[in-house]
Image (cartoon, rainbow, N blue to C red):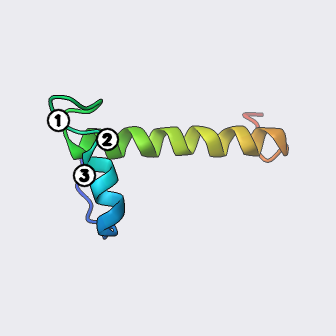
Amino acid sequence: MPKISVEIPQELLDDLDEHVGDDGKFVNRSDAIRASIRKNLDILDEIDARHDRLESDE
């Protein structure tokens, strides 16, 4: 799996960290960020579908 580097504002990182760890929803930051990216892409696909902007497989 490729690794990337991103700069994240401290406030956003603090919010993310509240969801990571033994009491959080995610095991680590990477899992949380991957889930967030997937969710965001799903939302964008839904918006594109509503506006007929998805490519067809034809």
Look at the image and tell me in which quarter the C terminus lies: top right
Q: CA distance from mark 2 to mark 3?
A: 16 Å
Q: On the image, numbered disc 2 is attached to which residue?
A: 32
Residue 14 locus on image (x, y percent): 28, 56
Amino acid tagged 3: Pro
Q: Residues within 10 Å of mark 2 (few under 14, many from 20)?
A: some
Q: Nearer the viewer, mark 1 or mark 2?
A: 1
Element at label 2: helix
From the viewer's side, name the closer residue of 49 and 28: 28
Question: Image point 23% across, 46% down: which residue?
Answer: 29
Of callouts 2 and 3, which one flags the residue occurring earlier in the amino acid sequence? 3
Q: On the image, numbered disc 3 is attached to which residue?
A: 2
Q: CA distance from mark 1 to mark 3?
A: 23 Å
In the image, taking residue 2 as reference, residue 48 lies left or right, namely right
Residue 57 locus on image (x, y percent): 72, 34
Question: Image point 27% across, 44% down: which residue?
Answer: 18
Residue 15: tell me if it is visible.
yes
